[in-house]
């Protein structure tokens, strides 16, 4: 009996010891893969300098490609490829000291020549960079040595450090630049493993990255899920770990009450608008555009499109932005005024228009609400649902539309009203002169006053129907760390994410 008990004790002790020996290794092995989801797939590729879709930078920015500066969730700006910078009092000369020892993923060195190439490429005759005007303001680029870049501007620009942290300002390796859309080569912490068109993008940690040991996620799969019900189902099933800017407004309670999830509700600098094709008759008549705006009840649109997760706006600017003024009273909801304006413009109801809607839920749901509102004043908006690639080519590219709904997520894009040939077809010499004056103004107070004038001008001219500033929702596994709350620009900073 004694011998039998001793044997049992020994066996138990050995098993316990084995478990204890295994415990530290188990505790140290953390999960290093993650599945993140986005509503839209990047179009036409992964180079954010080659397309206007914000989804491109959501995959690429700070992950595949890097910029001189980096924008954070709280809108702070720090150095990324630039260690530091100085600026002259007139804001016309920016001197950047570059980070040393950085390489591109093809082994080529990052240096001042690459910066010069990237910025000159952005303003080249073949460039389709949506922020081309930012780089056109650079009069001369000096590279006194491999680690110094001096940008000499035509007009002072207080916003330049922010603009150089956006996707349109990525630094590219010259030889790889033509194929960055499908075979991206950057200096970022991740490289492209696979792109399964219509389904997902797979990124893997680049071991050659200068801070690779600090990047916790070894592999990230980014899935594309546009259907609202499928978004919620993917989160609930655990198929998706993180879904930034997810469209679960109507089902948010099931996540808020579940300890498996974290729900982050944050602000944005985005503007959701119903764009109006100012070049098409009778939409080229400001009275018709004002009639359209007067027919729209913004509060009802916000409820119908995003279940109340938005703030009404009256211009292409949002609360919290420098120089913001409330312009919602310029074109208030007034159906009688809408009918009167149409009559003044000589429009005999019904006015037949097309409304082309991309696949995002706020556009499809908001479009139904607006179409019903327009019908009450004699405007028949025929809804045509299109896929994102069709929207980019047909609406944005060919301007083949009357009305469309879309969110402009870039924070510093008011200059779109001065862009020749832009998709909403607005051309105003008065606005162009005002915008030139804004860009040449260094004093912050005076600049803000001029920005107020610009907001009022595009509101009064009813270039678009300005609907709301969206409040973005992120739903994620409760153990994921490093997620952004506020969203000054649409980006997924994967190197900042990890598992608890």
Image (cartoon, grey):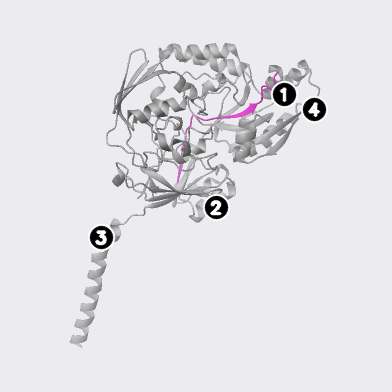
In the picture, which quadrant includes the N terminus?
A: bottom left
Could you say which quadrant of the image residue 334 lies in? top right
In the image, is residue 282 part of the stretch drawn in magenta? Answer: yes
Tell me, for residue 461, which label it has, or none.
none
Front tag of 1 and 4 = 4
Q: Is residue 261 left or right of residue 76?
A: right
Q: Is residue 367 left or right of residue 109?
A: right
In the image, is residue 419 part of the stretch drawn in magenta? Answer: no
Could you say which quadrant of the image residue 297 lies in? top right
Position of residue 142 relative to residue 64, above or below, is above
Does residue 300 show up?
Answer: no
Q: Earlier in the sequence, mark 4 or mark 2?
A: 2
Span colored in magenta: 262-284
What residue does disc 1 label?
335
Q: Earlier in the sequence, mark 1 or mark 3?
A: 3
What residue does disc 2 label?
233
| Circles 3 and 2 in contact, beta carbons < 8 Å | no
**Residue that appears at 40% across and 12% down:** 443
Q: Residues within 10 Å of mark 4 (few under 14, many from 20)?
A: few
Comparing 243 with 255, the one in front is 243
| Circles 4 and 2 in contact, beta carbons < 8 Å | no
Q: Position of residue 479 (x, y in %)?
A: 39, 50
Front tag of 2 and 1 = 2
Q: Position of residue 45 (x, y in %)?
A: 51, 40
Position of residue 156 relative to residue 483, above or below, is above
């Amino acid at each position: 009996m004694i011998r039998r008990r001793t044997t049992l004790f020994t066996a138990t002790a050995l098993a316990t010891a084995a478990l204890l020996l295994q415990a530290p290794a188990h505790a140290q092995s953390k999960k290093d893969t993650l599945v993140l989801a986005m509503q839209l797939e990047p179009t036409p590729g992964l180079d954010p300098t080659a397309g206007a879709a914000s989804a491109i930078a959501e995959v690429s920015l700070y992950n595949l490609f890097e910029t001189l500066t980096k924008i954070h969730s709280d809108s702070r700006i720090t150095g990324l490829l630039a260690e530091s910078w100085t600026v002259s009092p007139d804001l016309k000369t920016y001197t950047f000291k570059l980070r040393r020892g950085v390489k591109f993923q093809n082994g080529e060195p990052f240096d001042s020549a690459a910066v010069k190439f990237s910025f000159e490429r952005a303003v080249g005759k073949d460039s389709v960079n949506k922020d081309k005007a930012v780089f056109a303001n650079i009069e001369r680029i000096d590279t006194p040595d491999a680690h110094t870049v001096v940008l000499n501007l035509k007009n002072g620009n207080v916003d330049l450090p922010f603009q150089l942290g956006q996707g349109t300002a990525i630094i590219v390796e010259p030889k790889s630049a033509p194929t960055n859309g499908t075979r991206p080569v950057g200096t970022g912490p991740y490289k492209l493993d696979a792109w399964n068109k219509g389904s997902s993008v797979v990124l893997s940690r680049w071991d050659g990255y200068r801070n690779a040991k600090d990047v916790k996620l070894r592999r990230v799969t980014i899935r594309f899920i546009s259907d609202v019900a499928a978004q919620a189902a993917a989160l609930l099933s655990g198929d998706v770990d993180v879904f930034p800017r997810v469209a679960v407004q109507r089902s948010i309670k099931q996540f808020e009450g579940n300890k498996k999830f974290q729900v982050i509700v944050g602000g944005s600098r985005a503007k959701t608008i119903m764009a109006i094709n100012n070049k098409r008759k009778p939409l080229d008549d400001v009275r018709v555009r004002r009639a359209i705006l007067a027919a729209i009840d913004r509060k009802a649109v916000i409820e119908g499109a995003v279940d109340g997760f938005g703030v009404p706006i009256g211009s292409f600017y949002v609360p919290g932005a420098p120089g913001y003024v409330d312009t919602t009273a310029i074109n208030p909801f007034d159906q009688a005024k809408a009918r009167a304006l149409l009559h003044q413009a000589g429009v005999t109801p019904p006015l037949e228009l097309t409304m082309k809607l991309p696949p995002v839920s706020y556009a499809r749901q908001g479009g139904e609400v607006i179409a019903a509102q327009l019908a009450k004043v004699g405007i028949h908006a025929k809804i045509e649902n299109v896929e994102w690639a069709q929207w980019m080519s047909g609406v944005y590219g060919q301007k083949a539309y009357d009305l469309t709904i879309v969110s402009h997520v870039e924070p510093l894009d008011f200059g779109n009203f001065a862009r020749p040939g832009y998709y909403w077809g607005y051309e105003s010499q008065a606005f162009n002169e005002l915008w030139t004056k804004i860009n040449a103004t260094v004093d912050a107070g005076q600049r803000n006053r001029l920005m107020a004038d610009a907001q009022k001008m595009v509101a009064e001219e009813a270039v678009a129907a300005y609907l709301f500033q969206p409040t973005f929702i992120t739903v994620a596994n409760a153990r994921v760390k490093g997620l952004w709350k506020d969203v000054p620009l649409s980006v997924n900073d994967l190197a900042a994410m990890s598992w608890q």
